């Protein structure tokens, strides 16, 4: 995931072998959890400008992790 952030991806995602999927916003490092079925539509919404990251944070549960890459 650190490589995705270094390349400038605005929404790097961490894929774990079980749902849910964690999506982290590059600049704030805020994280949300979404189902596998929803991840593509959430990323598309934000990257296409249909929703802001703040909109997404309001709709989905936030996630914090002590292992967030610095």
Image (cartoon, rainbow, N blue to C red):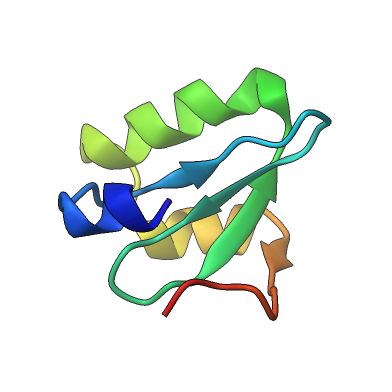
Looking at the image, which residue sits at the far front?
3
Nearest the eye: 35 or 5? 5
Q: Quadrant of the C terminus?
A: bottom left
Looking at the image, which residue sits at the far top?
37
In the picture provided, is 68 more to the left or to the right than 28? Answer: right
In the picture provided, is 49 more to the left or to the right than 41? Answer: left
In the picture provided, is 32 more to the left or to the right than 44? Answer: right
The picture places residue 56, in percent across and down from the top left corner, at 50, 53
Residue at point 39%, 61% (across, down): 25
Quadrant assignment, res 16:
top right
Residue 70 vertical position relative to residue 36 in the rendered view, above or below: below
Residue at point 48%, 24% (across, down): 41
The picture places residue 19, in percent across and down from the top left corner, at 81, 32
The picture places residue 3, in percent across and down from the top left corner, at 30, 51
The picture places residue 47, in percent across and down from the top left corner, at 25, 37
Quadrant assignment, res 18:
top right
Residue at point 69%, 50% (across, down): 33
Nearest the eye: 60 or 70? 70
Looking at the image, which residue sits at the far left?
8
In the picture provided, is 30 more to the left or to the right than 19? Answer: left
Q: How many marks?
A: 0
Residue at point 35%, 28% (across, down): 44
């Amino acid at each position: 995931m650190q490589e995705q952030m270094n390349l400038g991806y605005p929404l790097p995602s961490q894929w774990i072998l079980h749902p849910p999927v964690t999506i982290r916003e590059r600049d704030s490092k805020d994280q949300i959890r979404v189902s596998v079925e929803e991840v593509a539509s959430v990323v598309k919404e934000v990257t296409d400008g249909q929703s802001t990251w703040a909109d997404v944070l309001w709709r989905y549960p936030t996630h914090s992790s002590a292992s967030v890459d610095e």
